[in-house]
Amino acid sequence: MAALVATRSFDSTSPSGFARVASGVCGNSYRFLWRSRVVVTRLDAEGVPTYEQIDSVSFTDFALVAVGDLTFLRIENPSRNVRDLLNALETLVGMGFTVKPVIFDKGQPSTVFRSVDASKLVGLKIIGAVVADDLVARMEFASKEGIVLENMTVLDGLKYKVEHAVFELVLGGLKGQIAFAANGTVKISGHVAPKLLSLVEQDLHLFV
């Protein structure tokens, strides 16, 4: 995949293409760029509109992560629509290209928690909690001291799904934070972010 991406570079004449991102966390980090046109309306002193097209360049950063014989596509700060990127990759790869999302609806990567010095749950958002026959709740909890689910009596007897969980981690005296969403979105921050990212990626094959 990386070799194919390198064959379609972005230049001043191309409608879309790829560029290598030297500052990426891993070695195979890229930027997908594509051109689009925006129509701007201008009003003169008499209020008469004139229309002008302005060319713009949008981009999405991503990385190709190889784990065993699998290749994962990690999209940095994904927008609501990554269709242009996926269409471009499909064009490069050709027939047989498929993408399957990695989701954390039944758990989250565990290697990262076994590898740090300390961790605690500091944020939790649950959905689908059936409080009564005709009442479903959406609950959100936060604590700087840490959340222990077993001690939360408010959840006793409730069936629910975890939509979002935030953990504070300590590694080598440095703090970091990692958040998992059920839809597969992972947000990592702090001085140990690169290390936490690599630990999470080690477990990706378990969710395919």
Image (cartoon, helix red, strand yellow):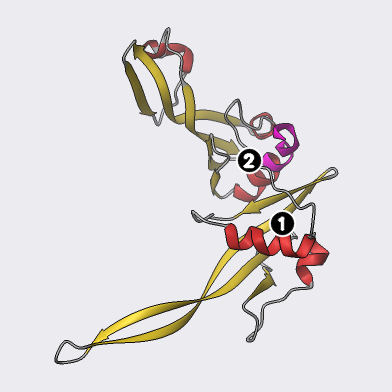
In the image, farthest residue toward the top: 157
Image position, residue 203 (x, y; %): 72, 36
The boundaries of the magenta stretch are 200-208
Q: Residues within 10 Å of mark 1 (few under 14, many from 20)?
A: some
Q: Are marks 1 and 2 in contact (CB under 8 Å)?
A: no
Position of 147 with respect to 44 (left or right) is right
175 vs 128, nearest the viewer: 128
Checking the image for residue 26, the label placed there is: 1
Marked residue nearer the N-terminal end (1 or 2)? 1
In the image, farthest residue toward the right: 69
Vertical relation: 1 (above or below) 108 = below
Q: Secondary structure at mark 1?
A: loop
Specify the quadrant of the image occupied by residue 33.
bottom right
Mark yes or no: residue 24 visible. Answer: no
Image position, residue 127 (x, y; %): 42, 26
Q: Which residue is mark 2?
A: 172
Identify which amino acid the numbered label 2 is placed on. Answer: Gly
Residue pictured at 84% horizontal, 42% vertical: 68
Position of 9 with respect to 175 (left or right) is right
106 vs 177, nearest the viewer: 106
Image position, residue 185 (x, y; %): 55, 43
Magenta highlight on residue 192: no
Vertical relation: 196 (above or below) 105 = below
> Which secondary structure type mostly characterizes the magenta part of the structure?
helix
Q: Residues within 10 Å of mark 2 (few under 14, many from 20)?
A: few
